[in-house]
Image (cartoon, grey):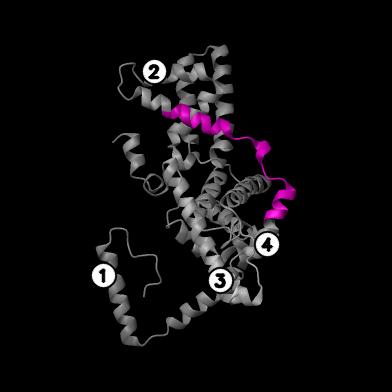
Amino acid sequence: LSEDDIYRTSTQYRLWSFSPEQLSTRRRKTHELALARARQLHASQTGDQQHNGSAQPEYLTEREELRLIHRYCELIQTTADHLKWPSNIKPVAVQYLKRFYLSNSCMTYPPKEIYKTILFLASKTEAYHLTVTKFAQSISADPEAILAPEYKIMQALRFTLDVRQPFRGLKGVLMELLNMAEGLKHFIDRIQACYATAKNLCDGPASLTDAYFLYTPSQILLAALHIADTPLTAFYLDTKLPLTLVSRPKILATIEGCAALLSSYDQKDSMGKEERAALEKKLDLCRDPTTKDLVKAHAEMKRNGAEDGVVDEHEAKRRKLEREKRAKEDPFGPSLGNGK
């Protein structure tokens, strides 16, 4: 199997890879569904607006939602840097946040209530051992507030936590180019400079744009190298792609397309304090009231689960036998549900 074949079996490719049109459509549908729900909830709470004069709140636009999500992706990066976490956690957490909001709206689950949980979840995924209490203390947060939305996030992520990153592949290209340089200092310095620039591009623009949704890790790293040093990257690609290769033009065009996306990122477009405050205020007025207290909802879910667990001995044995049967039949073991 080639690396491409292996990647196509990954959940990132099967569940989280899209064309630009598919990605745009999915975000639009999520926004429209949230908008319809918000209006329905408002109408049910206020009754007939023609009689009571209650006006609909001003809802977030799709663009405003994307702006907020982008702001909290940046906040994830700065928080991880402030905590001096390993660099591999940042892109994982950013992608979790982006994936979560493909099926959820900021008006239902505001990012300020989600991003801390996502950071904690990413730290566990990347085997950075940290208790929720210690993490909560480090960011002055309530441990219960961090844990409350965790299951909802896992559902939105479809219980797939794997995030394929371009960094290992980028390091591999560095090693190959250094071997080709054969100890010539001038070329080694150029290769190292190219690598450093490409790594920064993978760390910033690649995570903060839609690159992970639209391109594979290898395409992202080659695009970053293309931006960092176009002639050097062209030389490297010539060693991998024969001029007679039928797919060569398509591969090069894809790399250039990804490079254009990475180059389009401009930190100056980041949300300022005034814009953020205005959007947060607008969000507070139009958010879904049924999800305002996630801690309470989480406590009720656990309590209901405990109550539902009180069953007679016969029912308990029946459920146990069913679980054991499913576990034997399923090569991946039992489901992640509560075993009912």
Residue 203 placed where, x, y %?
Answer: 57, 37
Disc 1 marks which residue? 325
Residue 239 placed where, x, y %?
Answer: 39, 18
Question: Which contiguous range is marked in magenta?
Answer: 254-279
Q: Is residue 64 left or right of residue 233?
A: right
Disc 3 marks which residue? 41
**Front of the two marks 4 and 1:** 4
The amino acid type of the residue labelled 4 equals: Ala
Sooner in the amino-acid sequence: mark 3 or mark 2: 3
**Front of the two marks 1 and 3:** 3
The amino acid type of the residue labelled 3 equals: Leu
Spatial CA span between label 3 and label 2 = 60 Å
Spatial CA span between label 1 and label 3 = 43 Å
Q: Is residue 21 left or right of residue 280?
A: left
**Quick check: 44 above or below 229?**
below
Which quadrant does the N terminus fall into? top left
**Front of the two marks 3 and 4:** 3
Q: Is residue 28 left or right of residue 314?
A: right
Do the numbered discs 3 and 4 sit on residues whose CB atoms are within 8 Å? no
Disc 2 marks which residue? 239
